[in-house]
């Protein structure tokens, strides 16, 4: 008699593993981006860690839901707008769009947390500096997420 074999693809992953993966991704991306933006807004000072942690906490509350919403909207929109484009091209475009959208959202939340809205000129200047400083990393993350991690993450979450 032969033993029945179990396919590893059909193995269901526990919910805690899925949550842990999402928490790690959000923590890495949000933590790094808010760290860059916090530095650009206030520099390294005694209260940097507290400034960064408060910006990070706001970012996690904003970034995770906004990221899921925007990546869905952007991906579906690009599929409709560019039905004949290659999948890789759409993934690259999704990554670039995600970087700009998420950078904007994070720069607003971080700058609002650190400088407030009392002086519009100061807010816009600080937002712009934070956005531009974090943009290279954001583009790198956006492209990596859309080209490499998103397909693997979708498989992982479906399992």
Image: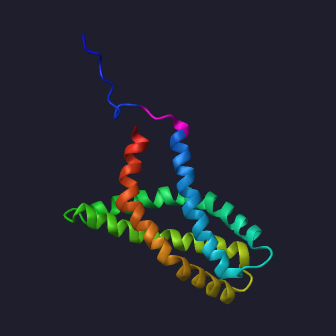
The residue sitting at 22% across, 62% down in the picture is 83
Q: Position of residue 30 (x, y in %)?
A: 58, 63
x and y, in percent, of residue 129 in the image: 59, 84
Residue at the image position 59 percent from the left and 80 percent from the top? 130
Q: Which residue lies furthest to the front in this view?
A: 1
Residue 117 lies within the magenta run: no
Residue 116 shows in this picture: no
Position of 63 compared to 139: left or right?
right
Determine the image quadrant of residue 5.
top left
Query: Is the C terminus in the top left, top right, bottom left or bottom right quadrant?
Result: top left
In this view, the residue in front, 54 or 69, is 54
Q: Which of 141 and 72 is in front in this view?
A: 141
Res 72 quadrant in image: bottom left
Q: Can residue 39 be seen in this view?
A: yes
Q: Residue at x 35, y 31 (%)?
A: 10
Return the residue found at the far right.
46
Vertical side of 80 occupied by 139: above or below: below
| Magenta segment boundaries in residue numbering | 12-16
Quarter holding the N terminus is top left
Q: In this view, does 32 lie above or below 133?
A: above
Q: Which colour scheme is used?
A: rainbow
Residue farthest toward the left in the current orientation of the protein:
84
Up-down relation of residue 11 to residue 46 (above or below): above
Q: Where does residue 55 sit, x and y in percent of width and height? A: 68, 67
Q: Which residue is drawn at 52% across and 40% down?
A: 17
Instruction: Specify the principal SS of the magenta part.
Output: loop
Vertical arrangement, residue 77 with respect to residue 1, above or below: below
Place of residue 80 in the rendered image (x, y in percent of width and height, measured from the top left) = 28, 61
């Amino acid at each position: 008699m032969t033993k029945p074999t179990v396919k590893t693809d059909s193995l269901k992953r526990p919910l805690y593993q899925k949550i842990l993966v999402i928490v790690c991704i959000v923590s890495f991306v949000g933590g790094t981006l808010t760290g860059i933006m916090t530095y650009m807004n206030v520099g390294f000072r005694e209260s940097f860690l507290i400034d960064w942690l408060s910006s990070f906490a706001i970012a996690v509350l904003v970034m995770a839901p906004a990221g899921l919403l925007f990546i869905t909207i952007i991906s579906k929109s690009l599929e409709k707008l560019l039905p004949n484009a290659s999948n890789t091209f759409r993934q690259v475009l999704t990554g670039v769009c995600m970087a700009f959208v998420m950078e904007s959202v994070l720069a607003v939340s971080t700058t609002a947390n650190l400088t407030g809205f009392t002086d519009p000129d100061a807010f816009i200047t600080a937002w712009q500096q934070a956005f531009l400083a974090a943009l290279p990393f954001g583009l790198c993350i956006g492209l990596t997420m859309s080209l490499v991690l998103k397909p693997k993450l979708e498989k992982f979450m479906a399992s």
